[in-house]
Image (tube, helix red, strand yellow):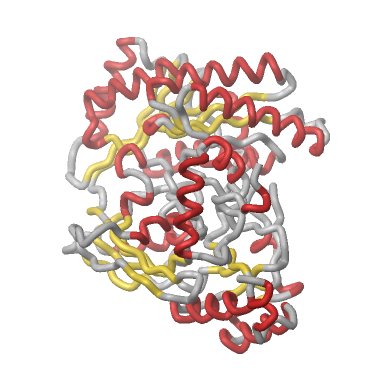
Amino acid sequence: MTQAQVSDSPYAAGEHTVQKELAKLLGPSGILTGDEISHAFTQDWAKDRTGRCMAVIRPATAQDVSQVCRLCAEAGVAIVPQGGHTGLVAGAQHDDTDCIILSTQRLNRICDVDTDNLSCTVEAGVVLETLQATLKEQGQQFGVAIGSQGSAQIGGLISTNAGGVRVLRHGMMGAHVMGLEMVLADGSIVSSISGLHKDNRGPDPLRLAIGGEGAFGIITKACLRISPQWQSAATAYVGCASFGDALAMLRHLRGTAHEVLSAFEVMSAACLPLAKFVDPTLVPPLDAPVHVLVQLGSALDLPLDDMLENALSAALEQGIAADAVVAKSDRQVQRLWALREGLVEGHSRRGYHVRSDVSLRLGQLPDAVSALETMLAAEFPDWIAQSYGHMGDGNLHFNALPLETMVETQAREIGKQIEQRIFDIILERGGSFSAEHGIGRTKAGWFHETMPARHNLLSRIKGAFDPDTMMNPGCLLVREDAKL
């Protein structure tokens, strides 16, 4: 929008006029301003970044979102969409007050569950845990599982193309999307939701919103693939001598249980104490340099415990596993997963740390872990290496913890150097610096610098969806006035 257009707008008098119009549009429950805006809206989950805004808008329908977008387009006010606020790359934190945060928390209706069609249609603000509970009542499930499922919303999961612990079985979030409803910057409501599993009437342009982080429009509704609820499951905790042995364990399980292998998580022993920040009673059931969490699941009533025990016995005989425990109750399963999920929150509770979300071809992962840990020990000896992640799909989270006595400002400066070295090592091996967390604002510069052709093509496409750059400016795509 040009300066002349802004000046001609009836809302050009200032943000208070815009707030007044938004309040008139949505009512008092639909807008938060001033001291009503808590850190729950402005601060990211990891407490690394705090954003600013003139107001938080809470629309209840797609029509509300449409009217908000029209009003903001006329007033020249940017829109930052926000879901469950569990992101880790500052996708929902804008630096200036020249924007509103549009929260999707009131867009929370499950519109339908079609068990014959194996699909469901839900609004963007539906919480993943709520969806799973509703589907379970009808003998169904959704294939995405993440640690933050009690807060994460469907719209945000789609916008970041979230991963989680079942990607090796079900794929990323985008693999589950059959169609979308989205509101564009000019307020247009567009939809590709048909409920059809095969609909080849040309490419669906709305799929740009998958991983688009709100840069192309605001997702208000989605049609998703679902699947029958598991009738049988088995979980084991395995100790290995190295990440190389853990990879050999994965190969072994593929040969014996590929069709039912649902999760294969790996953690270095140094990570496990972090789970105690969440629950001091969490203790690993075995001692080993590398810990592996394995899950099998099937919609058929199969003897998966026997299958897993037989596979683990063979792995122990072959020397690729040093020890193993098969969970015998739901309580044991929950405790084992609590270790994996707790170490993530434990990192945050401990304080500032370098956090990465990288991916490689699976066969390269053990070498990359070795290179990263060697680099940290040699170049930053005061820092503690933390290697864990979704080994089943090649996604590694390599974190680095400063000494607890290190001043945070100093740690953050050194942390930038460590992040640079992590990305160097991963990119040298043809990997990605963003596996499942997205780009956000934290990695927008890296995206522009390392993948200029893709970045520039997406910038040109964004111009068709959002010519005035009002939708989540600075997220995913570097702003023209801030390029490296």
Q: Name the residue at 63% across, 25% down.
A: 421
**Residue 270 or 119: which is nearer the viewer?**
119
User: Can residue 287 be seen in the rendering of this structure?
Assistant: no
User: Can residue 465 be seen in the rendering of this structure?
Assistant: yes
| x then y, percent, for residue 360 | 43, 28
Q: In the displayed structure, does residue 151 sit left or right of residue 231?
A: right
Instruction: Identify the image quadrant of the C terminus.
Output: top right
Q: In the displayed structure, does residue 137 sit left or right of residue 85?
A: left
Tell me the quarter of the picture where residue 120 sits.
bottom left
Q: Name the residue at 20% across, 36% down.
A: 303
**Count of all numbered marks drawn on residues in the image:** 0
Q: Name the residue at 72% across, 78% down.
A: 15
Q: Name the residue at 18% across, 62% down.
A: 117
Instruction: Identify the image quadrant of the N terminus.
Output: bottom right
| x then y, percent, for residue 394 | 41, 30
* Vertical placement of residue 196 versus 279, above or below: below
Q: In the displayed structure, does residue 396 sit left or right of residue 89?
A: left
**Residue 229 or 403: which is nearer the viewer?**
403
Tell me the quarter of the picture where residue 183 sits.
bottom left
* Vertical placement of residue 331 versus 392, above or below: below
Name the residue furthest bottom.
Answer: 24
**Residue 165 or 223: which is nearer the viewer?**
223
| x then y, percent, for residue 106 | 50, 74
* Vertical placement of residue 421 versus 211, above or below: above
* Vertical placement of residue 274 versus 116, above or below: above
| x then y, percent, for residue 58 | 56, 75
